[in-house]
Image (cartoon, rainbow, N blue to C red):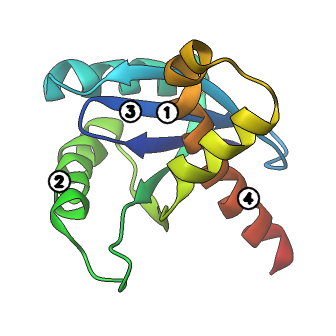
Amino acid sequence: MRILGLDIGEKWIGIAMSDPSETLATPLTRIGAADAEATIEAICRLVRQHHVEAVLAGMPYSLDGSLGQQARRVQSFLQKLSPRLGMPIETWDERFSTVNAQQKMIEAGKRRERRREQIDAAAAALILQEYLDSKRSL
């Protein structure tokens, strides 16, 4: 089964995809988040194109574990997206995912320009990989 991972930000949504065995998450792309309707349609297209059976979205909890303003925006977006996909969307704690993705890209020697283009999808891949790893450890 393929799982689509989302890192939902104010400007961009990073997208990652699992392999069919649900072992490895790979960065896929990023899409603009300014127009909610166009963004939802783009995600629906990716789900159909890649025969995705489940969607996971990073939830940006505050450091104390509460739902802050950005988390409420993500919840609102997911409430619009889920019925259009025809499937529930699971969430995963994404605290520090972008920071961790950026650090890994620096360690890999990615130039600053490339990091800006790839950071959102890389963060989505980290979120999805944590989820996949947790499923295997159960």
Looking at the image, tell me whether mark 4 or mark 1 is earlier in sequence order: 1
Q: Which residue is mark 2?
A: 73
User: Is 40 placed above or below 73 here?
Assistant: above
Q: Which residue is mark 3?
A: 13
Spatial separation of the CA atoms under disc 2 and disc 4: 25 Å
Q: Amino acid at mark 3?
A: Ile
Spatial separation of the CA atoms under disc 2 and disc 1: 17 Å
Q: Amino acid at mark 4?
A: Leu
* Element carrying mark 1: helix
Looking at the image, tell me whether mark 3 or mark 2 is earlier in sequence order: 3
Is 49 or 59 nearer to us in this picture? 59
* Element carrying mark 4: helix
Q: Which residue is mark 1?
A: 120
Looking at the image, residue 13 sits to the left or right of residue 94; the answer is left
Spatial separation of the CA atoms under disc 3 and disc 4: 20 Å
Query: Which residue is painted at 84% across and 49% down in the image?
Result: 23
Residue 26 position in % (x across, y down)? 72, 33
Query: Which residue is painted at 49% across and 28% down in the image?
Result: 47
Query: Which residue is painted at 39% across and 56% down in the image?
Result: 88
Looking at the image, tell me whether mark 2 or mark 1 is earlier in sequence order: 2
Q: Which mark is residue 132?
A: 4
Around disc 3, counting alpha carbons within 10 Å, would you say few (fewer than 14), some (14 to 19), or many (20 or more)?
A: many
Looking at the image, tell me whether mark 2 or mark 4 is earlier in sequence order: 2
| Mark 1 and mark 3 residues within 8 Å of each other at the beta carbon | yes
Spatial separation of the CA atoms under disc 1 and disc 3: 6 Å
